[in-house]
Image (cartoon, coloured by chain):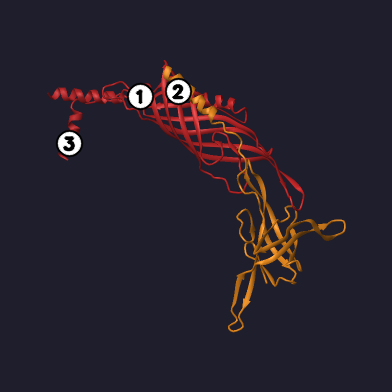
Amino acid sequence: MKNYILGFLILCLIIISSCTADQQCRENKTVNSKIGFYHVDKKSTDNTITTSPLTIDSISIRGLIYNNTTKIYVLMDSLLYKSALTKSNVLLPLNKFSSISKFEIAFNNKIKDTISVLYEKSDQYLSLDCGCIKVFEIDTVLTTNHFIDSIRITNHTVNTTNAENIHLYK
Amino acid sequence: MVFSVQAQKTNKVQKIDSIPLINGVTVQADVASIISSAFTSKETYSSEVAVQVDLKHKYFPILEVGYAGANKISNENITFQTNGMFSRLGVDLNLLTPKKDQKPTTNLFLAGLRLGMSSFKYNFNNFIITDTYWGGSETLNYTNISNTKIWYEIVLGIRVEVVKNIFMGWSVRTKNLLNQDVTGQISPWYIPGYGINNGSSWGLNYTIGYKLNIHSKIPIVKIKPGSEVKKKSSKITK
């Protein structure tokens, strides 16, 4: 009987010690679309096309947001990249409360192109500590052709995996 | 000489049959869940009772039923609330085998399996999503979401008779869900009867029970003198 009471006390201690403190979120909650730059080489001899990663010397990017009163897209005040040097890819946040995000990209502080990303968004539950995030499925991408030759979606799903979603070709 | 062998055989048969099929029914309540509920300051709470039948003092089918719930607020003020009934059905096996020519002890060392089930509703509110670059924020609320969870448990425990017909016991158990959540979809933080829904769960029970002396009739086996010997000899001839 004495042993039993002792066992019961130990049990109580285990229960008390098992009450853990609240945890902080340790999961990656950042969801950005990743855009890579590529160079297209077309050999005139046998018409073969090869692509190779392209490094941009200097790049500046900022978003374009639709102004409901003026009914036009206007540049965001803050830049996502400000004369960032030697970039072969960039991470661009998609608007969580719209189905289109537009970005103005200035290559080497001279030539500017505007790319538009159209997508469907959905809510993804992570955990009690981390909450929910928005994830995206890219439908369409469009671009102007001042510096960029073409654009292609390589991975439609934008989530926390950090995979490249869009290729820009020069 | 022949008579003495017959007498031994008859005794053996009587001993096996001296334990009836239904050898008592124990009604028990879990104390550990009530104590732990007090320590978790109502974040999670649970209480359960069980009925266990002693079959031949070897197999112990059990039905556990209870009520549990949770009221949890995360660091980011996300609130989770649920409550519901749960039940577990299973069987324990007594690992203590009585020594030869000894009366089986009332103490038990049990190993068993359970199949648990709970149908419940939960509210998961105040998920705030903000857009730091483009601006804007949204609050997501999931209310009255119905869910049914099924899981299995592996149980190990002891039970001792402290006073006549009063039993105390403790057991540890691991729990694993049979129907897993779909990644990315909203899922309950707490499942009544299972615990916190974060991979496999574990549980501790400390029970106090009363054994009701419900017994089935001991079947009377009529042994014809010399029948056992005959059986044995027929085996040998084969």
State which quarter of the image contains the C terminus of chain A: bottom right
Residue identifier under label 1: B20
Any part of residue B9 in sight: yes
Colour of the chain lettered B = red
Pick whichever, A107 or A50, lies toward us. Answer: A107
Q: Which chain is orange?
A: A
Q: How crowded is the residue under tag 2: few (<14 C-alpha within 10 Å), some, or many (20+)? A: few
Name the N-terminal-most of marks 1 and 3. 1
Left or right: A21, with A73 as reference point? left
Q: Amino acid at mark 2?
A: Gly
Left or right: B62, with B56 as reference point? right
> Same chain, marks 1 and 2?
no
Q: Numbered disc 1: what chain?
A: B
- Mark drawn on residue A7: 2
- Mark drawn on residue B238: none
Residue that sits furthest to the top in the current view: B163
Q: Amino acid at mark 3?
A: Ser
> Same chain, marks 3 and 2?
no
